[in-house]
């Protein structure tokens, strides 16, 4: 299989920073020679491509938006140009996730299947997503887009393409609390109560809480006092914390613990955890990775959130499987030429294996015979 590099070059060349699609839709439409169903809302491009078949729907899910490349001077090559250095490809969005879109497109264009193959793309996955996938979920059934299986192209692999998949992800919650003190003059600290002096004990409490939540990540991402005047002890210290959690009990324990420190604690869940209801796809992915690569693919719930969570209520089988995630969102985002070919090969075998599994299950289930009474 040869790589259609011009198609990939065209995708990478679009500075589709959230929520802009910046013409990716037209590039994909030309490559597939298909007209998309437009589900766009306001400044967010949402669209759907489908191959014609009477079979059940396998839906590929992806996003064309990318994060800001940061300082161009930190890149080896211009971020919105595809460049090759010693078989390594560079470009913003290559890993997250235009490379997977390229692989999806190749499968849709070149793989014969009795499954219905669809690809749903949005230009706001990296941002708020308010006009993206969650907004169009109610419109899918009305347009006969009811997936039996969902394959998401987020970068899930760790050391080797194909070594990790996800059928569940953790949720994300934010907490803001304050440690109170008494404002005063730095020359007379005995007349004040410096809230910063309580931080050591607070950090110890947070460490103890983390030990009770081994499958969670608890991270301080902002810490500030209410004053930066050089001769004044501040009145309070504000701390913002992010929790990545899989179970609601872990969230509730964190909430209870932090409320003891600050009864006026503010909290917000920005993403709910999700888990695939059925488990047909992991066995197929594991067999595909073994057949194609000779490796065992392992499940994981680590990493950030993804648009897969919005499908939990309407699709029983969800799996995420993609490129290595090491350079996602980094300067010099990159993957090897071979990695893209490998991912495409894995997707092709996945489609064929899923189709074969359905056929086998159908043939092994006898038709019901109604006997005359």
Image (tube, rainbow, N blue to C red):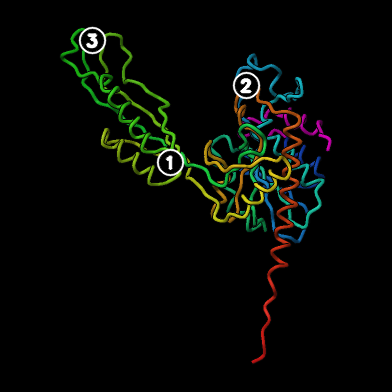
Q: Position of residue 70 (x, y in %)?
A: 60, 20
Q: Earlier in the sequence, mark 2 or mark 3?
A: 3
In terms of secondary structure, where does tag 1 sit? strand
Image position of 140 with respect to 131: above or below: below
User: Any mark on residue 186, and which?
Assistant: 3
Image position of 182 with respect to 128: above or below: above
**Going by the image, does 99 lie left or right of 231?**
right
Work out whether residue 318 or residue 360 is closer to the camera in this orientation and state it.
Answer: 360
- Say whether residue 22 is magenta: yes
Q: Is residue 134 visible?
A: no
User: Any mark on residue 331, and which?
Assistant: 2
Work out whether residue 160 or residue 133 is closer to the camera in this orientation and state it.
Answer: 160
The alpha-carbon separation of the residues under discs 2 and 3 comes to 43 Å
Work out whether residue 64 or residue 318 is closer to the camera in this orientation and state it.
Answer: 318
Q: Quadrant of the N terminus?
A: top right
In terms of secondary structure, where does tag 2 sit? loop
- The residue range painted magenta reads 1-23
Task: Name the residue rendered at 66%, 33% in the picture.
Answer: 160
> Which residue is identified by label 1?
269
Q: Residue furthest bottom?
A: 373
Counting every numbered tag in the picture gives: 3
The alpha-carbon separation of the residues under discs 3 and 1 comes to 38 Å
User: Are discs 3 and 1 less than 8 Å apart at CB?
Assistant: no
Q: Position of residue 19 (x, y in %)?
A: 61, 34
Q: Is residue 284 visible?
A: yes
């Amino acid at each position: 299989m040869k790589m259609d590099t011009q198609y990939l070059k065209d995708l990478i060349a679009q500075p589709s920073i959230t929520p802009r699609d910046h013409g990716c839709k037209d590039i994909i439409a030309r490559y597939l020679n298909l007209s998309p169903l437009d589900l766009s809302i306001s400044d967010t491009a949402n669209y759907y491509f489908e191959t014609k078949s009477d079979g059940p729907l396998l839906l590929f899910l992806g996003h064309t938006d990318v994060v800001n490349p940061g300082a161009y001077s930190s890149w080896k090559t211009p971020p919105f140009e595809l460049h090759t250095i010693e078989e390594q490809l560079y470009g913003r969005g290559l890993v997250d996730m235009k490379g997977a879109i390229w692989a999806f497109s190749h499968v849709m264009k070149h793989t014969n299947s009795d499954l219905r193959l669809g690809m749903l793309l949005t230009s706001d996955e990296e941002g708020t997503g308010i006009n993206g996938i969650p907004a169009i979920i109610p419109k899918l059934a009305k347009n006969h887009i009811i997936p039996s299986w969902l394959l998401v192209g987020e970068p899930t692999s760790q050391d080797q393409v194909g070594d990790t998949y996800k059928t569940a992800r953790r949720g994300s919650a934010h907490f803001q609390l304050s440690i109170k003190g008494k404002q005063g003059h730095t020359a007379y600290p005995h007349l004040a109560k410096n809230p910063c002096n309580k931080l050591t004990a607070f950090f110890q409490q947070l460490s103890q809480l983390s030990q009770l939540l081994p499958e969670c990540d608890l991270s301080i991402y902002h810490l500030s006092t209410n004053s930066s005047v050089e001769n004044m002890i501040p009145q309070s210290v504000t701390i913002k914390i992010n929790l990545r959690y899989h179970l609601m009990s872990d969230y509730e324990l964190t909430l209870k613990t932090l409320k003891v420190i600050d009864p006026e604690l503010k909290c917000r869940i920005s993403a709910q955890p999700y888990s695939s209801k059925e488990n047909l796809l992991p066995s197929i992915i594991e067999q595909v990775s073994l057949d194609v690569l000779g490796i065992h693919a392992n499940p994981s719930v680590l990493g950030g959130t993804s648009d897969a969570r919005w499908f939990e209520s309407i699709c029983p089988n969800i799996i995420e499987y993609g490129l290595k995630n090491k350079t996602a969102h980094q300067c010099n985002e990159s993957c090897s030429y071979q990695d893209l070919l490998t991912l495409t090969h894995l997707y092709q075998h996945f489609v064929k294996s899923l189709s074969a599994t359905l056929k086998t299950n159908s043939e092994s289930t006898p038709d019901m015979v109604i006997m005359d009474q």
